[in-house]
Amino acid sequence: MIEPVFHLLNRSRKKHLPFIGLARRNFLHDLSLLRDKRGYFNAGIPRFNYLFGRDSIISAWQTLDYNPSVARATLAVLSKLQGKKNDLATEEEPGKIIHEAYFGPQSKVPHTYFRMPYYGSADATPLYLLLFMRYFEKTNDAGFLKKHIKNIRQAQDFMLKKIHAKNKDDFFRYRCTSRGGDFHQGWKDGRRDHLRILPPVAIVEVQGYVYAALRETAHLAGSEERTLELVREAEHLKTRFLKKFWLKKEKYFVLALDGRGKKRKAVTSNPGHLLFTGILDKVHADLVVKRLFKSDLFTPYGIRTHSKLEKDFNPFSYHLGSVWPHDNWVIAEGLKKTRHWKEYNRVVNGLKRAYRRMKKIPEYYAVVGKTVVEIPGACYPHAWSSGALLNMLSMK
């Protein structure tokens, strides 16, 4: 069970304690149901009650103020499972962090078509490095960091290899190589090409994650020369990213570049994830924020994954129009960093409003007009949804 740290609440919020106290207790209960005996959070009940790289990392990040041991346990198990060889069947590569893994009786779950552990994730590796840095900043646990310095450097090497896979001016890309694996491997993942992008895919938010991971862990590279190399690579990525992914006319970022370098133009929530990474200058950040809060994306209950102006928009769709609390939380982290406090509060209030209406905060939900609608099949409880609001309600 995660023990709450009540002193983190701002004193000015005392008048809201009845709602906040009850909500926090509910979120802590949700998370306790997902806490694995190994210390990390499983993703969600009932369909994803096991370890995910991306999900478990983000929920550990969200709960650092409550219990840093969740992050420690998550990093430890992901380090143990870190890729050691090249295997097309599982998409394992040296230094790569898993997408998902089962343990014990779960290791033979019949619904999966690929071997476990499965490594088909474009974002788990940079997020793993970012969690390491946030865990260390929170705990100053130098011994744990030192113990896993080899894992950190292998993850750095993996990212550099991916950037240089095609040529030195390329981006971090993914392509499914396994039978039955995920065609798309960013957070809007799926076994089919629901995003309509020809591989190898350079998805927008992952470029920001990689930039942040290289910059934030460069000092751990092992030598001054190597540190400078990582910083140079990160800045080179930033320069070409702002040039290639930006749409001047629309004043927004594309969803991705496909395998031929063609831009996949769609107005989505994905560019909002760039705000916390540092890959954006102030001009681009301000324009991204402005676009996120137009009425085709922003709703009274949070930011949609996909603009309702897009032809394939569906408010009930998994990734093409629904609202995801964790997606909103990542964007909100960037709004804090870029000091867009008005917009940050709008996101927080939207998620709080959804929670009040549904009496829970599931994996994702629909917004139709001014009404929030539960979607059958959405996981509840879901770690990074409960973690999102728990974190927001505890902000200093």
Image (spheres, rainbow, N blue to C red):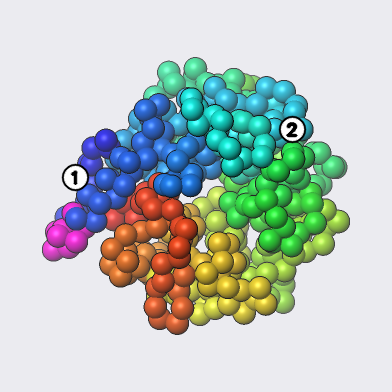
Query: Horizontal placement of 371 versus 148: left or right?
Result: left
Residue 228 quadrant: top right
Q: What residue type is disc 1 on?
A: His
- Which residue is depicted at the point 52% across and 39% down? 52
- Give the magenta part as a residue range: 13-21
Residue at position x 41%, y 47% in the image: 45
Which residue appears at 66% of the width and 65% of the height?
253
Nearer the camera: disc 2 or disc 1: 2
Picture coordinates of residue 158, whole percent (x, y): 69, 32
Residue 66, percent across and down?
A: 29, 40
Q: CA distance from mark 2 to mark 1?
A: 48 Å
Mark 1: secondary structure: helix
**Does the rendering let one see residue 288?**
no
Q: Which kind of residue does numbered mark 2 sit on?
A: Ala
Q: How packed is label 2: few (under 14 Cα within 10 Å), some, or many (20 or more)? A: some
Tell me the quarter of the image containing the N terminus: top left
How packed is label 1: few (under 14 Cα within 10 Å), some, or many (20 or more)?
A: few
Q: Position of residue 203 (x, y in %)?
A: 68, 54
Q: Mark on residue 53?
A: none
> Farthest front residue?
110
Q: Is residue 210 left or right of residue 22?
A: right
Q: Which residue is mark 2?
A: 89
Assign the magenta stretch its main secondary structure.
helix
- 265 part of magenta stretch: no
Residue at the spot of label 1 = 7
